[in-house]
Image (tube, helix red, strand yellow):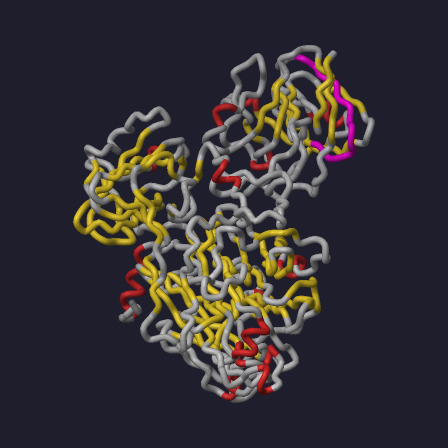
């Protein structure tokens, strides 16, 4: 007799299960059974197979309960069964089981006037769960009405289940576990986070681009062409685009005593990461920034994102300070936590004090103004930060470290913000660094280093800024009284760890001349805000002060002009405008890789005032799925970040929900930035919107066109600097 190892046993119309999923609505709460028993089954035939109960529409038709019958489980079985493995066995056979590891199991058996297995199960030690009402497992015959019983098995316990029995909820011997399946179809490796070789000067490997998933899920967010993840084939040319600095910069400059004459007496009004988030309840932008160098954290608000007000706050009368003076800050981040179930934790702050190697601190707040006290947590280098990855619901700590490559980053993640702060010194793993494709500034010649890495969820990707340091070294800058030369380079990730940087040009760079953003350009923790048809990238820049030189004045580097006169400005980019696929003289064609979705309407972001875009849907064999053909498609024209694709006779793609298919696009004389399938005609993407913006109610785009309308009502006029 063959032996099959499992967690649970089988039973005729009896099902052994292990609890571990949500309670079934309307049938009462389930028992507190959490540990699954492991069971070995002796079987005398080779027909026994493994199945799985599932309410997924794609799997429901394959829930065959017996190997020698066509009985299928109905859709209305209790949620307690959803996701449970079960043995498909011959309907009339009896099977023996032995418990290999202690745990709880369930049995599902007939409990009706014609057949009632209750006495048999009770004799085996099972007890009926009365909070789960009897139900029809399959068919419409009352004889198929079953109930659920439970038992805790002991290791080594043996028992024989009667015929007409299905055993479910067990685990079986499998191949080594694979990693987490992400929202977009990417499967993470079993070892997570992975090991990155800091000793190599090669660009960071991006596994999901080398081995792309066979099927890409596109329910979350606008689908961007920042890489070839979505593209099967195209003759269009990729073009990279960069934010344009605002001619009215800086928006926030040192003006108050707190900003001009703090601990260091170095004028600073700029967030080093910090945070700038749209508050949908108050309908204002909230900014947390640093006042004076390595000194205080202050708070400002704005209705339009250009004019900023500094409210008097209760912490220190007459100032907009939010942390007590005892907390000096060097590097820090504020994140609005939309998923917090505790109002007192709506805002979370990571703080790293000045110094070489120190312990980070964590603060939480209900309103972002009044913050509690903090303990000391994990050890990290200066300029460490954190961000939230909503795709995986992880808090990620971007920690400064040093290696043979100079300034580098280590990675640590956690489900819980406070628990995550308690990493041990050897737990964060090597992560990101500058590499051989990061070119030195020819005016300086130093090897580039990775100064900081901020990131945020934007639409369907994690959007990052690599702050690249080109030099000179601190001692040289201190002697000159001028800021370091740093710039911000776009980085894109679809798994939250591996970063693709196909274009190494600085998106926002130091000017390296006597202006407010002469050097030391840095990003904000939220990266950008979404303002109708545009993205606003706030950044900090330093003018420096050649009057404060270390050689002549005897100042320490930290008090020299290299860190003086910092202010905050903004730069603008088209929404989704990082990369476009262009068609000029010849018609551009693009075929996506296999996709699946559950939305209804196709939307695109295009710039084609003199051309147009057509779309069609094809199956896995390249055959057009009617009526969604080029022939029936109404050309999308003009310059718009939100345009619906329509077909004559039918716009609703829901008939294709959860099917594998491809889109094929045809573009004439234009630029193609993104596409997505929306749940409704608002054009909502259900993707993430970084720091948010007018019209949004959270960090998710569930409003579509309403955000564009809300932005237009503000009447903000912009004149980007050319």
Can residue 336 be seen at all in this image of the molecule?
no
Query: Quadrant where the N terminus lies?
Result: top right
Horizontal relation, residue 329 to residue 259: left or right? right
Q: Position of residue 507 (x, y in %)?
A: 40, 60
**Does residue 134 lie above or below 393 as drawn?**
above
Q: Residue at x 52, y 46 (%)?
A: 495
Figure label count: 0
In this view, 701 is above or below 652: below
Q: Which residues are magenta?
A: 93-105
Front position in the image: 514 or 655 = 514
* Quadrant of the snapshot with the C terminus: bottom left
- Whether residue 7 is visible, yes or no, is yes
- Vertical arrangement, residue 716 with respect to residue 268, above or below: above
Q: In this view of the protein, which residue sits in the foreground, 479 or 657?
A: 479
**Prevalent SS, magenta region:** strand
Is residue 271 shown left or right of residue 515? right
> Looking at the image, which residue is at 70% across and 53% down?
427
- Depth check: give the residue in front, 495 or 118: 495
Q: Residue at x 50, y 62 (%)?
A: 445
Question: Residue 396: where, in percent of width, then height?
Answer: 58, 56
- Name the outermost residue toward the left: 610
In the picture, residue 362 is in which quadrant?
bottom right
- Reply yes or no: does residue 100 show up in magenta: yes
Q: Which quadrant of the structure image shows residue 321?
A: bottom right
Q: Is residue 496 left or right of residue 708?
A: right
Residue 571 highlighted magenta (yes or no): no
């Amino acid at each position: 007799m063959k032996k099959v190892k499992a967690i649970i046993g089988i039973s005729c119309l009896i099902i052994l299960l292990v609890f571990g999923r949500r309670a079934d609505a309307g049938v009462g709460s389930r028992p507190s059974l959490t540990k699954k028993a492991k069971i070995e089954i002796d079987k005398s035939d080779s027909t026994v197979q493994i199945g799985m109960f599932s309410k997924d529409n794609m799997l429901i038709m394959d829930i065959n309960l017996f190997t020698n019958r066509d009985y299928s489980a109905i859709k209305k079985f209790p949620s307690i069964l959803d996701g449970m493995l079960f043995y498909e066995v011959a309907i009339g056979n009896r099977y023996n089981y032995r418990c290999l590891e202690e745990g709880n199991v369930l049995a599902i058996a007939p409990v009706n006037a014609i057949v009632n297995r209750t006495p048999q199960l009770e004799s085996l030690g099972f007890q009926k769960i009365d909070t789960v009402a009897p139900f029809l497992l399959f068919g419409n015959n009352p004889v198929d009405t079953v109930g659920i019983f439970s038992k805790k098995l002991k290791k080594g316990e043996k028992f024989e289940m009667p015929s007409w029995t299905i055993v479910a909820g067990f685990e079986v011997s499998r191949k080594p576990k694979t990693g987490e399946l992400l929202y977009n179809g990417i499967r993470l490796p079993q070892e997570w986070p992975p090991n990155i070789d800091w000793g190599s000067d090669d660009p960071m490997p991006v596994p999901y681009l080398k081995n792309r998933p066979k099927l890409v899920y596109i329910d979350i967010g606008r689908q961007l062409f920042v890489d070839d993840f979505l593209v099967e084939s195209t003759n269009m040319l990729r073009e990279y685009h960069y934010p344009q600095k605002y001619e009215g910069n800086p928006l926030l400059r040192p003006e108050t005593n707190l900003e001009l004459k703090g601990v260091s007496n170095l004028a600073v009004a700029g967030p080093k990461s910090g945070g700038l988030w749209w508050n949908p309840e108050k309908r204002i932008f909230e900014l947390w920034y640093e006042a004076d160098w390595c000194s205080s954290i202050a708070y400002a608000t704005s209705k339009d994102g250009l004019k900023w007000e500094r409210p008097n706050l209760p912490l220190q009368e007459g100032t907009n300070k939010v942390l007590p003076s005892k907390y000096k800050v060097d590097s820090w981040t504020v994140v609005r936590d939309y998923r917090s179930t505790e109002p007192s934790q709506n805002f979370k702050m990571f703080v790293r004090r000045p110094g070489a190697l120190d312990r980070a601190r964590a603060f939480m707040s209900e309103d972002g103004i009044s913050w509690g006290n903090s303990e000391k947590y994990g050890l990290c280098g200066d300029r460490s930060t954190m961000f939230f990855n909503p795709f995986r619901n992880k808090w990620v700590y971007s920690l400064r470290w040093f290696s043979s490559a100079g300034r580098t980053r280590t990675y640590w993640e956690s489900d819980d913000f406070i628990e995550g702060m308690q990493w041990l010194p050897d737990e964060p793993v090597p992560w990101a660094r500058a590499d051989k494709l990061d070119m030195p500034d020819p005016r300086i010649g130093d090897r580039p280093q990775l100064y900081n890495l901020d990131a945020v969820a934007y639409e369907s990707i994690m959007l990052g800024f690599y702050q690249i340091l080109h030099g000179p070294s601190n001692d040289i800058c201190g002697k000159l009284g001028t800021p370091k030369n740093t710039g911000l380079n776009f980085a894109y990730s679809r798994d939250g760890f591996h970063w693709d940087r196909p274009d190494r040009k600085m998106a926002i760079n130091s000017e390296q001349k006597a202006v407010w953003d002469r050097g030391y350009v840095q990003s904000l923790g939220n990266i950008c805000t979404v303002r109708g048809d545009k993205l606003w990238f706030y950044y900090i820049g330093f003018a420096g002060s050649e009057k404060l030189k270390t050689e002549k004045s005897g100042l320490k580097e930290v008090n020299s002009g290299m860190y003086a006169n910092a202010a905050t400005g903004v730069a603008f980019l088209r929404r989704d405008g990082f990369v476009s696929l262009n068609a000029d003289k010849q018609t551009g064609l693009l075929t996506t890789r296999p996709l699946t979705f559950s939305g209804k309407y196709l939307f695109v972001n295009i710039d084609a005032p003199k051309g147009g875009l057509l779309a069609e849907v094809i199956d896995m064999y390249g055959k057009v799925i009617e009526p969604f053909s080029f022939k029936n498609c109404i050309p999308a024209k003009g310059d718009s970040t939100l345009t619906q694709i329509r077909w004559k006779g039918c716009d609703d793609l829901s008939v294709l929900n959860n099917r594998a298919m491809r889109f094929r696009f045809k573009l004439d004389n234009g630029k193609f930035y993104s596409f997505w399938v929306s749940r409704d005609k608002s054009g909502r993407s259900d993707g993430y919107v970084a720091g948010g913006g007018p019209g949004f109610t959270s960090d998710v785009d569930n409003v579509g066109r309403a955000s564009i309308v809300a932005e237009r009502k503000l009447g903000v006029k912009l004149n980007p600097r050319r």
